[in-house]
Image: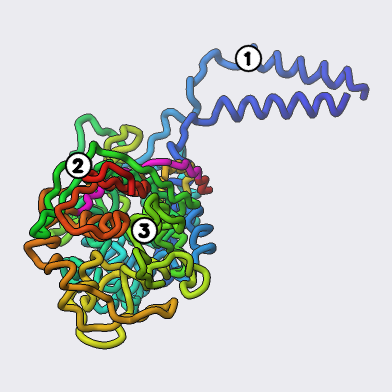
């Protein structure tokens, strides 16, 4: 009975209190509880809203020791741009100018120029400069990937040329669609000039660089391989079987024997032995050979970012006066028979034609048995290694 | 004395009191006791005690009235600052952070929240503000005035659920660009493969 009365009294008092109270609410509970941001460290933790990036950085080979602020509150870039953030510390309160809380840097903000940047605490730090791309206008036109960097810079997908950087250097997934003419139809005239006859319709080759999708997870440099993005080119090269005429390997984009001549330098069968991997093969045999003596042309002496944009005739010409490292152990001098080739490597001959035809002229001729011009060939583009001798009406 | 008799006595006294008492009531007890508002004092905490409790545990804004401790005077500094904001304001404004923190001439002398290009500081360009879109869309939302949602989201202890759609891949179309004498590649880029990350901040 007593407990019943007590219960009744509690209910009555509660009802009275509810009736008497005012129906006010705060829109957001906690909205008047403001964070004190005056301490030296970051009082509004980036990871409260960006926690997945912590996981990416923890798995990254590079930058994993950085706090968010190292990049995203950098104060002076390598090209001297100052970024002033809103700051409240022991010395006072400073309004932001260029940014309030954080900034999306371009990779070249640290890896451009001389690599000296100032981090969030205004401490000078050094980042390894991106070779060639750290220069004004991104360096030499002989860098094979310079156009990728320029296109990335000119498009708004990300800041600066970041798209180009993260496409190779991070675990960001890229779906490539290479659109090329399906084939090239060209003639080498009697006077050794190259005459493109026609090109085939656009042909699209799709290559997927499938990764974790993590932009902040950076790869070790050794994990960046040519054939990840250029597997179609590797597919065209990696034909070690004889061609239809038995005159050369059935490959395109590269050739290493023809007739009774051979040189192992361009032989993909040395991948895994003389060449550590396919990337070593691509660079050492062609796209960045090591010049060991002599005076190389600008295409081989300019600083580039890893790979060079060149063709057979940049090494093999009458003007060649340098030696290169031949890892499989063959000759070190890029051979060239000028009497046979009739100054083919001159500016008004093969170099007057588009770059994508240069290797085609070299390889098609050898696969056809090295006939003298006038010759006409139809060659299919990567990943296809097919070639056709139009004059003789046969595949070569 | 048995309980029944106690209840009976109490009931009799109660009924007698009801009969004897005059039949007048006040709708609200205390409604004729008026506060003196001539000194610009407020009594906000009467209804908004929860807000006062929040101010008591934060150093920021607790001393906007230049006095130590939290007394309730702090409310006026923010909520009675911009009385010209709109018509018909009686007691308080629904204030926006920008009235003080984006206004260099604010009477409160509040630190400027520069870096978004929104303050009247001529050096405030906000050209590199990574959270600019967050602030911009907060400004377009009607839930709170101006960009206040963005400010409260980062700078206060409000429970927050953030959903971010993050691109984890892109499509690069690499097209051969050629003429009779030149060839090169042009690349167009488009983000794709968006992954949703949900962050709860409490």
Residue B155 placement (x, y as % from top left): 40, 53
Q: Which residue is mark 3?
A: A247
Q: Quadrant of residue B43?
A: top left
Q: Are marks 2 and 1 on the same chain?
A: no
Disc 2/disc 3 C-alpha distance (Å): 26 Å
Can residue A30 be spotted in the picture?
yes
Disc 2/disc 1 C-alpha distance (Å): 113 Å
Q: Which residue is mark 1?
A: B20
Residue A284 placement (x, y as % from top left): 37, 73
Q: Which residues are magenta?
A: B184-198
Which of the two residues, A340 or A11, is positioned nearer the viewer here? A340
Disc 3/disc 1 C-alpha distance (Å): 128 Å
Left or right: residue A143 compared with residue A39: left
Left or right: residue A213 compared with residue A142: right
Does the stretch in magenta take in A197?
A: no
Q: Which residue is mark 2?
A: A199
Left or right: residue B154 compared with residue B90: right
**Vertical position of residue A34 compared to residue A197: above or below:** below
Q: Are marks 2 and 3 on the same chain?
A: yes
Can residue A39 be spotted in the picture?
no
Does the stretch in magenta take in B191?
A: yes
Residue B168 placement (x, y as % from top left): 43, 47
Cβ atoms under marks 3 and 1 closer than 8 Å = no
Q: Residue at x 25, y 52 (%)?
A: B100
Q: Depth-wise, is mark 3 or mark 1 nearer the camera? A: 3
**Vertical position of residue A223 compared to residue B47: above or below:** below
Badge 2 local density, few (<14 within 10 Å), some, or many (20+)? some
Which of the two residues, A71 or B192, is positioned nearer the viewer here? B192
């Amino acid at each position: 009975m007593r407990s019943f009365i007590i219960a009744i009294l509690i209910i009555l008092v509660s009802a009275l209190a509810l009736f008497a109270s005012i129906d006010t609410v705060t829109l957001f509970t906690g909205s008047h509880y403001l964070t004190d941001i005056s301490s030296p460290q970051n009082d509004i933790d980036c990871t409260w809203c960006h926690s997945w990036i912590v996981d990416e950085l923890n798995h990254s080979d590079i930058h994993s020791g950085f706090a968010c602020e190292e990049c995203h509150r950098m104060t002076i870039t390598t090209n001297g741009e100052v970024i002033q953030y809103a700051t409240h510390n022991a010395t006072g309160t400073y309004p932001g100018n260029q940014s309030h809380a954080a900034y999306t840097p371009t990779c070249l903000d640290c890896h451009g120029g001389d690599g000296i940047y100032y981090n969030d605490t205004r401490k000078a730090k050094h980042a390894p400069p991106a070779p060639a791309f750290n220069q004004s206008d991104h360096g030499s036109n002989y860098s094979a990937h310079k156009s990728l960097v320029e296109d990335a810079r000119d498009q708004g997908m990300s800041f600066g040329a970041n798209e180009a950087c993260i496409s190779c250097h991070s675990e960001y997934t890229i779906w490539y669609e290479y659109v090329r003419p399906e084939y090239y139809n060209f003639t080498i005239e009697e006077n050794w000039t190259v005459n493109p006859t026609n090109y085939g319709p656009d042909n699209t080759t799709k290559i997927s660089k499938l990764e974790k999708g993590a932009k902040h997870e950076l790869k070790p440099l050794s994990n960046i391989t040519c054939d990840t993005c250029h597997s179609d080119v590797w597919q065209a090269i990696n034909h070690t079987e004889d061609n239809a005429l038995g005159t050369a390997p059935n490959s395109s984009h590269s050739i290493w024997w023809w007739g009774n001549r051979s040189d192992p330098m361009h032989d993909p069968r040395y991948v895994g032995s003389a060449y550590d991997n396919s990337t070593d093969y691509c660079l050492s045999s062609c796209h960045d050979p090591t010049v060991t003596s002599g005076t190389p042309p600008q295409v081989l002496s300019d600083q580039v970012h890893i790979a060079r944009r060149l063709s057979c005739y940049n090494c093999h010409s009458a003007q060649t006066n340098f030696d290169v490292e031949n890892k499989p152990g063959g000759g070190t001098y890029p051979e060239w028979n000028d009497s046979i080739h009739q100054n083919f490597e001159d500016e008004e001959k093969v170099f007057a034609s588009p770059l994508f035809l240069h290797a085609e002229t070299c390889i098609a001729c050898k696969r056809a048995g090295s006939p003298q011009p006038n010759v006409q060939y139809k060659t299919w583009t990567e990943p296809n290694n097919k070639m056709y001798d139009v004059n003789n009406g046969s595949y070569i | 004395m048995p309980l029944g008799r106690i209840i009976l006595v109490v009931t009799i006294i109660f009924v007698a009191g009801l009969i004897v008492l005059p039949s007048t009531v006040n709708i609200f007890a205390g409604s004729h006791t008026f506060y003196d508002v001539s000194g610009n004092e407020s009594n906000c905490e009467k209804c908004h005690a929860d807000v006062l409790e929040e101010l008591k545990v934060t150093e920021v804004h607790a001393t906007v009235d230049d006095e130590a401790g939290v007394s309730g005077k702090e409310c006026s500094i923010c909520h009675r600052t911009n009385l010209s904001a709109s018509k018909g304001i009686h007691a308080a404004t629904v204030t926006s952070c920008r009235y003080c923190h984006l206004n260099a001439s604010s009477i409160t002398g509040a630190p400027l929240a520069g870096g978004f290009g929104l303050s009247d500081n001529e050096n405030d360009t906000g050209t590199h503000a990574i959270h600019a879109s967050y602030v911009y869309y907060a400004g377009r939302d009607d839930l709170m005035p101006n960009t206040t949602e963005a400010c409260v989201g980062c700078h206060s202890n409000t429970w927050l659920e953030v959903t971010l759609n993050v691109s984890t891949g892109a499509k690069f179309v690499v097209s051969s660009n050629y003429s009779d004498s030149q060839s090169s590649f042009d690349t167009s880029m488009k983000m794709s493969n968006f992954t949703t990350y949900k962050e709860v901040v409490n």
